[in-house]
Amino acid sequence: MEAQHSIAGTALRLLQGDLTEARVDAVVNAANSSLMGGGGVDGALHRRGGPAIREACTTIRREQYPDGLPTGEAVTTTAGDLPARHVIHTVGPVWRGGGQGEAQTLANAYRHSLEQARAHGLRTVAFPSISTGAYGYPIDQAARVALTTVTDSLRRHAGAFDEVQFVLFSRADFDTYRQALEALG
Ligand code: ADP
């Protein structure tokens, strides 16, 4: 399954698939603040990428974020044995009903991930659906925030990226993102 749009010269692609297989400059990890791995897409990326990712995260924790990576921030590491070249780790918000700034924090996670990619000259980036697994963010609302934020960043930084993908794990998630993208026009 696939859908494609062009935003200010950058291809925006929605795919159904497994993020650990993405052959891109950077895959974005829906990490937790510890950066030490976890369940869901985080666990899958660490497993398939091997120990180099965890070692890089340990160094970042020690040198930059001894209290953990704050929600909405992002950092970049090697991708170890993954087909991608780098992993951008970001922490989405835990859903607490929507009145705790979740939308803003989720937008920050996407925006800061793309900022990391730009800072490292990474031109193809693949995202998962951040916060919609263990963190419980309703996916229709999360898809709207994700797509609005990413298309806005692509317009602000025209020419910075060749392609940005959303790799959705299930057919249902893919359909939700496709509908949200169509609704944006
Ligand atoms: P969070 O803690 O941010 O909610 P999760 O990893 O629990 O992160 O879930 C985020 C999304 O990633 C969910 O929609 C889940 O289905 C999806 N996901 C899990 N494994 C993969 C994978 N290998 N590739 C792409 N998406 C995945």
Image (cartoon, helix red, strand yellow):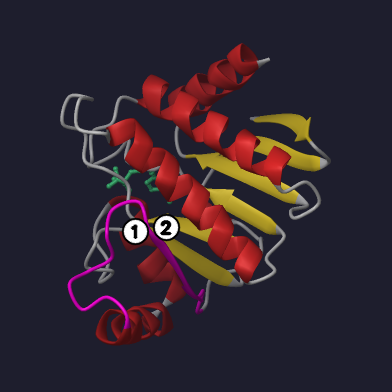
> Could you tell me the amino acid type at mark 2?
Asn
The residue depicted at 72 percent of the width and 38 percent of the height is 155
Front position in the image: 159 or 125: 159
Residues rendered magenta in the picture: 64-80
What element does badge 1 sit on? helix
3 on left or right of 109: right
What element does badge 2 sit on? strand
Residue position for label 2: 29
Q: Is mark 1 within 8 Å of ligand 1?
A: yes
In the rendered image, the vertical position of residue 28 relative to residue 11, given as above or below = below
Q: Which of labels 1 and 2 is toward the front?
A: 2
Q: How many discs appear? A: 2
Residue at the extreme front: 156
* x and y percentages locating residue 167 in the rendered image: 54, 42
Residue 105 shows in this picture: yes
Q: Residues within 10 Å of mark 2 (few under 14, many from 20)?
A: many
